[in-house]
Image (spheres, helix red, strand yellow):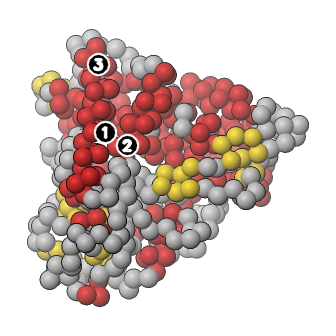
Amino acid sequence: MTSTSTSPSQPAAPSHVPKERVSNIDMYNHIVGDEDYHESWVRMRNENNHDLVWTPHNGGHWVALRGSMIREIYADYQRFTSEVMYLPKAVGEKYDMIPVRMDPPEHTPFREILNKALNLREVRKLEEPIRQLAASMIDEIKGKGECDICTDFASKFPIYVFLEMAGLPRADTERLADLATRMVKVTGATPDEMVAGFEAARNDFFDYVRPAVEARRGKPGDDLLSDIVNSEVDGRAMTERETLSLVSLVLLAGLDTTVNFIGFLFAYLGKHPDRVKELTSDPSRIPRCVEEMFRRFPLVAEARMVANDQIYSGVELKRGEMILLPTALSGLDERENECPMKLDFQRKTMSHTTFGEGAHRCAGMHLARLEIIVTLQEWLARIPEFELVPNSKSTYLPGIVVGISNVPLRWNVGQNIQRGGLSE
C-alpha cells in the first residue's frame, strides 16, 4: 500500500492532540536511503520523545512506539477494539474478514473453529509431509548453485502447504499469491483509491474461494476447508458470507507472512556465514534460533480502534480514532530485550508480539513455527554453506505485512554434499 506524504488532503492534528505528540510517521513510506524496514522503525521511534504519537498520514492516527504499550493495546479489546484494524481507516472499515474484526464474546465461537483446526496437536501431524515437501523443493535447487530464495522457494513453499491442507490444486499457487499480495499491499495515492483497490482484491478472493466452499458444504472431508465449511457457530450453520470470510482469512493469514519471513531469515543468514556455522555445528539450536528470528524480524503493522473516549499515556483519545501497532517495535524495544538489534541465538529470555497478543493472537503460529524450523533444518542439511550474492540489494515493500524481494543466494555445489543428521 502506498500513500502520498505531501497530499493536501492529510488532516491537521485534532485540537486535543498536543503539538509535541505530532510525528511524521508514514507506515507505507518510511524507509530512508539504505535502511532496511526494521532499522527504519527503530529510527522513527528514537526520533520521538513519547511512547504514543499522532501522525497526519493515512487519514491521521496514533502510533504506539513501545513494546509494553503494543502488547497492552493488543490484549485490551474493551478499550481498543478490532472492529477496524487496518489503515487508512477507510480501508480498514472494508476489511470484514471474521473473526479478526470481532471482539469477544462474538469472536469466540469462530476462533474456536480455527483453534480446532490449527492447534499444536493437529499441526504436529503435518510435520512429515511438510518436511518431505521442503526437502524435495530444496533438492531441486541445490544443484544449481544459486537461487533467489524469495521467488524460487519462499513464494511457493508455504502456499503449497496450505493448498495441500485445504485440498486445493497446486496449479492455483500464482493466483493465490497474487490475491494475497493485493489484500495486504493495496496500492493507491489516496484513501479512496486504496479502498477501491482493496474491495476489488477482497471480491476476487471471495470469487476464488466460493466454488471450493460450495463443493464442500454438507460433505465432510479430511481437509482444512471441509472442516471449516461444515463447522457450526452457536449450534447453527455459518452463513455463506461468514464461511467465505473465515475461509479467506485462513488462506490469507497462512500465505503472505510466512512467505516474507523466509526471505528476511535467509537475507540475514546469507550475510552472516558465522551464524550459519553455529547452526550446522549444533542443529539442536535451530528451534531457538527461529524464535529469536521471529523476535528480530516481525512483519505485521496492524491497528486497533479506540472504543471509547479516554485518557491514555497522558493524552486524550477519542472514540473512533486509530492506533497503529507496529510489531517491529515490540521485539526491537531495548526496554524489553537487551541489545535488541543483535541476533543472539543464546538469548535466555525474549519478548515480542510477532504473533500478536490477546484474543486475536495468530491462530496459525504453530504452523508458521513448524514451517520455518523445517525449512531451516532441511536447507542446512543440503546446503550448509551459502552466501548472499555480493552487492545485491533487497527491496522492502511496506504494508500491513511488509514484503521483501531480491534475496539472491549462491553456494559451491561441490562443497555442499548432503550431510546426514540435520533432518533425521
Q: Are marks 2 and 1 in contact (CB under 8 Å)?
A: yes
Q: Amino acid at mark 2?
A: Arg
Is any atom of residue 72 visible in this view?
Answer: no
Give the structural element (helix, strand or loop) at label 3: helix
Find residue 18 and report its image quarter: bottom left
**Counting residues from the N terminus, which is met first, the one under dot 2 or under dot 1?**
2
Mark 1 in CB contact with mark 3 (< 8 angstroms): no
Separation of marks 2 and 1 at Cα, in angstroms: 6 Å
Check the image and name the residue furthest to the right: 414
* Amino acid on which disc 1 is placed: Ala
Q: Earlier in the sequence, mark 1 or mark 3?
A: 1
User: Which quarter of the image is occupied by the C terminus?
Assistant: top right
Residue at (22, 13) in percent of width and height: 218
**What's the distance in space between the residues labelled 2 and 3, CA to CA?**
20 Å
Q: Kindly identify the residue that appears in the image at 49 percent across and 22 percent down.
A: 170
Image quadrant where residue 57 sits: bottom left
- The numbered disc on residue 201 is 1
- Horizontal side of 74 relative to 150 (left or right) equals left
Q: Residues within 10 Å of mark 3 (few under 14, many from 20)?
A: few
Q: Quadrant of residue 68?
A: bottom left
Q: Which residue is mark 3?
A: 211
**Count of numbered labels shown in the rendering:** 3
Report which residue position mark 2 lands on: 182
Quarter of the image with the N terminus is: bottom left
Looking at the rendered structure, the kind of residue marked 3 is Pro
Residue found at x 28% / y 64%:
58
Relative to 415, 296 lies left or right: left
